[in-house]
Structure formats: structure tokens, C-alpha cells
Image (cartoon, grey):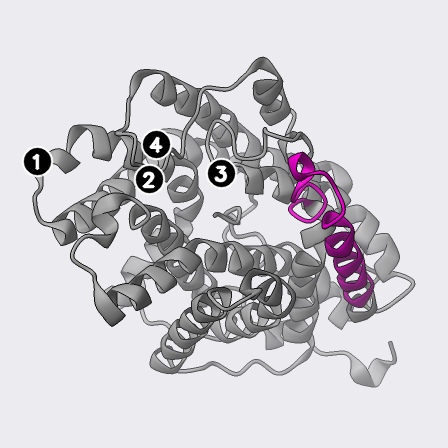
Amino acid sequence: MNEGSRVPAAALPRRLPGIDVLRALAASSVVVGHIVKWPWGYAGRDGFIGAVWRLVAAGLGTWGVGVFFVLSGLCIHLPVARRLALGEPPRVALGPYFKRRFFRIYPPHALVIGLSWLAAATLTLPPDYVHYLSKPTSVQFWAHVFMLHTFVPGATYSINSVLWTIAIEAHFYLLYPLLLLLRRRMEMRTICAGLFALMLGLRALDHVLPPAFAGVLTNNFLGRWWEWVLGAVLAERLARAPFRSLPRGWVLAATLVAAVAYCAAEGLPHGVAIVAITAPFVHAAVVLWSARLATREDRWLDRVLTSVGYRSYSLYLTHPIALTLFAVVVAGRLTIPWAQVAGAFAFSIAAAWLYFVLVERRFLPQSSGGRTVGELPVAAPIR
């Protein structure tokens, strides 16, 4: 990089609060997507409105997953992208990096494995409810402990159906030093294009595998790595270009439109394959807009969304447990479907706050040197 192309790191603000806002929206969409898959989520929604509601609700969770993959790549790579913008080589101190990632992800995740197992063994849902928790076999349990369950048929969605993304995120983190070695030899956009081609090949191969292995090739780090690297591409763009903030209303409206369009596309014939290939580019645009979001501390909505986003990892980890407990203990006492939906969401938020205070917050000092851009506690993508 020549001297004239270098951009001062100060061109990018040290804090990007819009990142937390997007994390709150993505995490909340996953929780709502899980809530409405239960019978009372669809109650009273017939005709055209009901069809639209079911279509949007069915895609909310996978929309959040895609956003989080791109967002995670941006947050992890942004400190290195700052140094690249100054002409420095792409590198990280491996010891501190792996220490931060371990304490950020693994201890809260390990405890949730046990809590999910306990809840699945003691709580009994009605037969028409989707079971987000399950009692594991010994193979499933140890696959989760070592974060290998995305490679074990029948284990991917076991114990707690959202923990598959934790394993994929851990694999991304482990491979990040390799990504930086590749970055020394080629542009991040070139690496992303190569991984995109790999994803297409794996999707083609996935169609010829036995049904028991369906998704094993595409729903792991090999099939999704290009989305994470797409976030790294955005990080380098943000670090190099002059920073321009965007109005909150415009960003939130564009994010809503993007989410609805994603859900509508997923409902089309072959829609799942279509969005898997095209939607990450839309997610990247949403992430880029949100990184430039202008927030104000005197606005209650900004404060609430930022706070939920900061705790979104706890919300991700605990909401299947919270929803199951709510359905067994509380939901039957509420006769209005909307009250059940709102109550389940509020219960999930409360459980996440409690888990953050009692568990997650205790590991933040070891996982981050401060809440700066790129070192924000990154919530794993959720389904």
C-alpha cells in the first residue's frame, strides 16, 4: 500500500453503537421466530394476513443467523483492518486473541449445555410444540463439549437447537490466524470470492449425500465461512473510507425492508437455496448501514436497543430454555395469543438479563480490553 492511500485510523470512530442496535434487532428476530412457531403463535391469523404472518415469522430466525455471521466477521477483523489502513501487516497476538475468544464464548456456552439438558429432562411440552431442547446421547453431549456437533449427524441441533452456531463461530475464530496469513498474499475480497465458490461446490455435493448427512457440508464453517469473511471485507472498507453517519430512521426502515424481503424470498420455490446464495450480500449492506448508524443517549429507543444488543449473547444462549419454561409454567394461564407472544418475549429478555448478570458479565474482563470497535463482545449468530 503506498503512502498516499493510507487513511488515519481516527477517520473511524472508536465506538460504533449501531452495531449493538443491529445485534438487538437480529437477536430479537430469532426469539420471535421461535415463539411464533408454537401453536398460539399462529392462533387467529387466517387468510392473507395469516399467510403473510407465517411467512415472515418462519424466516426471522434464519435472517438473524445470516446477519450475525457477517456482523461477527466485521467485529473481529476491524482492529486489524485499522492497522491495514495505516499500512501495517495483518496480524494478531495469538495468545491474547485466543484467550479473549475462549472466555467470551466458552464458559457461558458450557453452562447452558448443562442447563438445557436439565430443562429437557424435567420439563414436558405438549406434543404439538416444537421442542428446542432435548436430552442428549453421550455422543451428542461430548460433541457439544468439544464443539464438533455440526459434523456429527443427528447432533447438530441436539440439547439446545441454537447451539450449532456457537460451534461454527468457534471454528471461524480458530481459523482467523490462517485467514490473516492468506490476507498477506491477496485481497480479502479475493479470499471471499474463493470461499463463495467453495460454498457452491459444497451445496452441489450435499445433494448427492445420503439423507442422514444432509446439511453436514453446508451448515458448518466450510459452507458459511464466506459470509464471515464478507464481514471482514466490510471492516476493511470502513477502516479505509471517510466515516459518514446515517440517520437512525433510515437505517431501521431499510433493515426492516431487508428482513421482510428475506422472509418473502425464502418462501418462494427453491427459496432456501436462493437466499443462501444471495441474502448475505443484503446482510452485508445492513451491517454496513448499521455501523454508520447515528444514535443518541437521550433517546430511549437507542438506549434500549443498545442495551439489548450488548446482552444479545445471553439472549441467544438462554431463550430456548426460557421459552420452554414459559410454555410449561405460564402460557396456559394466558388465553389471548398476543399476550402469550408478548409474555414469552418479555420472559426471554428477563432471563437473558439474569444470565448476563450472574454468568456472562463475570467473563467480560478476561474477554475484552474495553468496549472499543472490534472488541465489542460479539454474540454468536442464532437460529
Q: Where is mark 4, residue-wise?
A: 321
Q: Residues within 10 Å of mark 3 (few under 14, many from 20)?
A: some
Disc 2 is placed on an element classified as: helix
Q: Give the alpha-carbon distance from disc 1 to disc 4, as whole Å.
A: 19 Å
37 is within the stretch colored magenta: no
Q: Which circle's residue, 3 or 4, is located before the other in the chain?
A: 4
Cβ atoms at labels 4 and 2 below 8 Å apart: no
* Residue 352: mark: 2
Residue furthest to the top in view is 138
Vertical relation: 80 (above or below) 281: above
Asked whether residue 376 appears in the rendered view, the answer is: yes
Q: Give the alpha-carbon distance from disc 3 to disc 1, as whole Å.
A: 38 Å
Cβ atoms at labels 2 and 3 below 8 Å apart: no
| Residues in magenta, as a range | 192-220
Q: Which circle's residue, 4 or 2, is located before the other in the chain?
A: 4
Residue type indicated by callout 3: Leu
**In the foreground, 271 or 75:** 271
Image position of 322 (left or right of 268): left
Residue type indicated by callout 1: Arg
Q: Give the alpha-carbon distance from disc 2 to disc 1, as whole Å.
A: 23 Å
Q: Can you give x and y, in whole percent of width and height, for residue 66 in the image?
A: 55, 58
Residue type indicated by callout 4: Ile
Q: Where is mark 1, residue-wise?
A: 333
Say which quarter of the image contains residue 102.
Answer: top right
Disc 3 is placed on an element classified as: helix
Residue furthest to the bottom in view is 4
Q: Give the alpha-carbon distance from disc 4 to disc 2, as whole Å.
A: 10 Å
Say which quarter of the image contains residue 56.
Answer: bottom left
